[in-house]
Image (cartoon, rainbow, N blue to C red):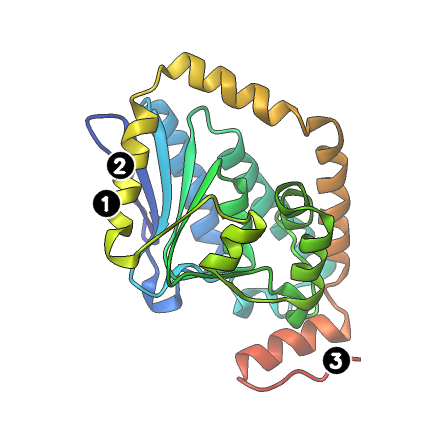
Amino acid sequence: MTWDTITLDVDADGVATLTVDRPDQLNALTVDTLEAIGEALDEAEADGARALVLAGAGDEAFVAGADISYMVELSTPEAQAYAELGHRVADAIESFPAPTVAAIDGYAFGGGCELALACDLRVAAESAVLGQTEIDLGIIPGWGGTQRLSRLVGDETAKRLVFLGERIDAAEAAEVGFVGEVVADDAFDDRIDELAGELAAKPAFATRAAKEALNAVHDGTQKGGLALERRAWAGLFGTHDQREGMRAFLEKREPEFE
């Protein structure tokens, strides 16, 4: 299959590279893009991918977030449907039968961070900047961030990142455990290729079993937490702060929250 907003390449060694290809929009995630990612994950699995790299096109962003121009006027039921779509994609990344690597080169905010959190491994270029920045739009992370981030970095750090909407550089992200590795910008592509190749060379059935077992550690409580997050996220749509935060972003001004 071919798509307008993403590309998928599976090489001879079984390394699949799924690239969000909207560089002029900092690879922001539209509904069509999310649906395309889901389809590409299915295709990569059908092609027997032994490792998968999730990347963003261009030099500025991994994925700068969700499409705010789409979200600004959503009703609560529409926001619930959007949350469900984002969760399906993040869940599909998390449950992909081979190891997944988020290649974070540039900005990774909001929904972009949440897709990275759904990956097994996260590698950041030195110039990368990350953040769960939703609070400044009058909402909260809605695609798994409240659950996966806490499990990765601990409650205190997760709450600081979510409450304050802080943007942190790659070095700090590594320090708190948000990413596992930071690589010089000029060596980044080579390191991603090297790591993906190493993963693809491992025994596929054992790697899949290891991933399933590791993911099962959190299954008991995560599903309930994710359901709560979806309801909480969608319930913020229609509030003054959500409308004001997103309009202010689109109008390039400071928001006036209640």
Q: Of 154 and 54, which appears nearest the observer?
A: 154
Question: Dot 2 corresponds to which residue?
Answer: 194
Q: Is residue 33 left or right of residue 58?
A: right
SS at mark 1? helix
Q: Is residue 104 left or right of residue 228?
A: left
Residue lying furthest front: 175
Residue 184 appearing in the image: yes
* Alpha carbon separation for disc pair 3 and 2: 46 Å
* Alpha carbon separation for disc pair 3 and 1: 44 Å
Instruction: Relative to 174, say whether 100 is above or below.
Output: above
Q: Which mark is on residue 190?
A: 1
* Alpha carbon separation for disc pair 1 and 2: 6 Å
SS at mark 3? loop
Amino acid marked by disc 3: Phe
Residue 66, how many percent across, how many down?
52, 60
Tell me what residue is drawn at x 29 percent, y 58 percent.
185
Looking at the rendering, in which quadrant would you find the C terminus?
bottom right
Q: Are marks 1 and 2 in contact (CB under 8 Å)?
A: yes
Q: Is residue 238 left or right of residue 152?
A: right
Q: Is residue 12 left or right of residue 245?
A: left
